[in-house]
Amino acid sequence: MSTFQDLGLNDDLLQAITDLGFTKPSEVQEKAIPILLESETDLVALAQTGTGKTAAFGFPMLEKIDVASRTTQGLILSPTRELCLQITNEMKLYGKYCKGLNVVAVYGGSSIQDQAREIKRGAQIIVATPGRMKDMIKRRLVDISKIQYSVLDEADEMLNMGFKEDITDILSHTPVDKSTWLFSATMPREVATIAKKFMNNPQEITVGTKNESTSNVSHEYYLVNARDRYQALKRLSDANPDIFSVIFCRTKRDTQKVAENLIEDGYSAGALHGDLSQNQRDLVMKSFRNQQIQILVATDVAARGIDVDDITHVINYQLPDEPEVYTHRSGRTGRAGKTGISMVIVSKSEVRKIKSIERIINKKFEKKDIPDGADICEVQLMSLANKIHNTEINHEIDKHLSSINELFADTDKDELIKKFFSVEFTRFYNYYNKSKNLNVAEGSYDRDSRREGGRDFSRGSKNDSTRYFINVGGKDGFDWMKLKDFLKEQMNLGRDDVFKVETKDSFSFFNTENELKEKVLAHFTDFKHEGRFVNVEVSENRGGGRRNDRRSGSSGKRRDDRRSGGRRDDRKESSGNRGDRRRSDSGSKPRRSDSSDFGSSRPRRSRR
């Protein structure tokens, strides 16, 4: 492997590299830096998160720009505020000896006028999120018509977040003859389209295999019932006492709920998602970097700015909608040459997703069992013993030794050790004694799980599940997936607890296991949604699939008219705005759940 001196960087940059403690370039740096220094070319670089991509484009850009000029010469686009700030800070560190260098971060959640003033003072490099950058261009607060270098960092994630139009609009205000450098962990079709449209015969480098996960990360999955997902999460945390992890959830609501329940159960946890203010997010990330927070629960979008090298585990509380996103998640651990573990908690219907991810990352998952109570108690006990053994003695205690010795004068060594460790051990023993086995056998997976005609027909039979009628449907803005999510959120159920969902125009059907029947019917007694009564009844047709649509006739109309007070037009109109109201409510603080998925008691963990 070459050194940074061999790559051809100038003395100012080499001095900064020495100060930062960098010794040898990473593979992506070794491949990208010489290409970008030696020629004016476009570049597509595919490399995993945590492989040193910022330095790979940062050093060449700093080498090539004219710091004596106040003109903006470089533009770096990144998907999130956290990543934008991270890149800005790193660029400033790399260019600390480049006198006159001004790198400005442009992102939402902060004063746009303050950012415009910073740019006006002379910003050779702007690091920006697409949304705020487009806004500044529209207001004519920034001029990027003379930039020489543009970087699309985490390009796949920016496109996943819906920034394609923003990126296209921003790049249309830049010179045609600029150099564009695209860095991405994966190469989906949308990224290839951007590269083709805005790049001219780009050179391509790949670290590892396209979309492949880093070799420093091992991949494990744990098969449980959906309702036991939270209990499984707690056991995995307890079985790894020194865990320093990121837990990924699919939605902001679930992220907040999981974090709140972990905190209430005594874990050192925090939430990171888009509904937090910038100040709140900064405080959470500062606490996490300082390891004052041991477990960070995050959405995929918010986690894009996490740049912490010591993360030991990534736990996928829920799998992402897109299998490619798993690559980004697992890349949060195993960074800077260290090893890490990516865990996935899955229910029976999600096992097939593991196989899809294996093909994408070119790695095999190892199926493991959730530890039982005895194993966890042993791990916690030995962890405490090791911490005590390695603790440095505080000799301020010496003056109290005589009193302590007097108290334990009649206690032998073995009894004293037992008493001492029982203080901690008993809490875990009492909690996990007689705890149930959470593991589900692979063979119990329902081979007939399938989707037919856009409807969900996973699990259940007429003998072990209950079929329900509900008087909402397509006219109310529900398809089968939206209705399934609605029911799951309303009753705090696991995603697999609602199945065989079938939507009609003004009513729908769904199934749950028989044991949930009383909970479902009780929840929807005198239940109102957006001012309208929602009625749920046990359906005569318990099997699911297609049925006689007699409810769609006059009787179905009378039922809808009765429940809506005869205002069918008003109901239809309100459904058209449901999406906006739902989005605005998504950030509200979730209620404490009393379901089995959340909220069971647990011995309070000591804060680390």
Image (spheres, grey):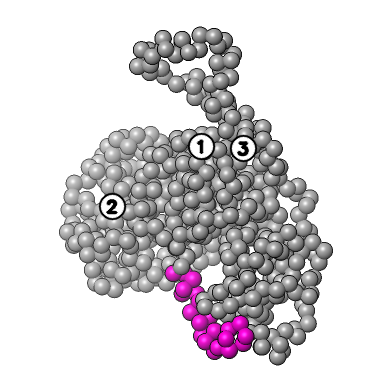
The percent position of residue 505, horizontal first and vertical second, equals: 65, 83
Which portion, as a residue range, is magenta?
561-584
Q: Label 2 belongs to which residue?
A: 64
Give the Cα separation between the discs numbered 2 and 3: 61 Å
Q: Label 1 belongs to which residue?
A: 605
| Front label number (1 vs 2) | 1
Image point (26%, 56%), residue name: 104
Give the Cα separation between the discs numbered 1 and 2: 52 Å
Q: Is residue 45 left or right of residue 432?
A: left
Sequence-first tag of 3 and 1: 3
The percent position of residue 42, horizontal first and vertical second, equals: 40, 59
| Front label number (2 vs 3) | 3
Residue 396 among those drawn in magenta:
no
Image quadrant for the N terminus?
top left
SS at circle 2: helix
Task: Tell me, yes or no, if residue 580 can be seen here.
Answer: yes
Q: Label 3 belongs to which residue?
A: 431
Q: Nearer the viewer, residue 436 or 154?
A: 436
Dot 2 crowding, Cα within 10 Å, few <14, some 14–19, many 20+: some
Q: Is residue 435 left or right of residue 259?
A: right
Furthest toward the right, the residue is 463
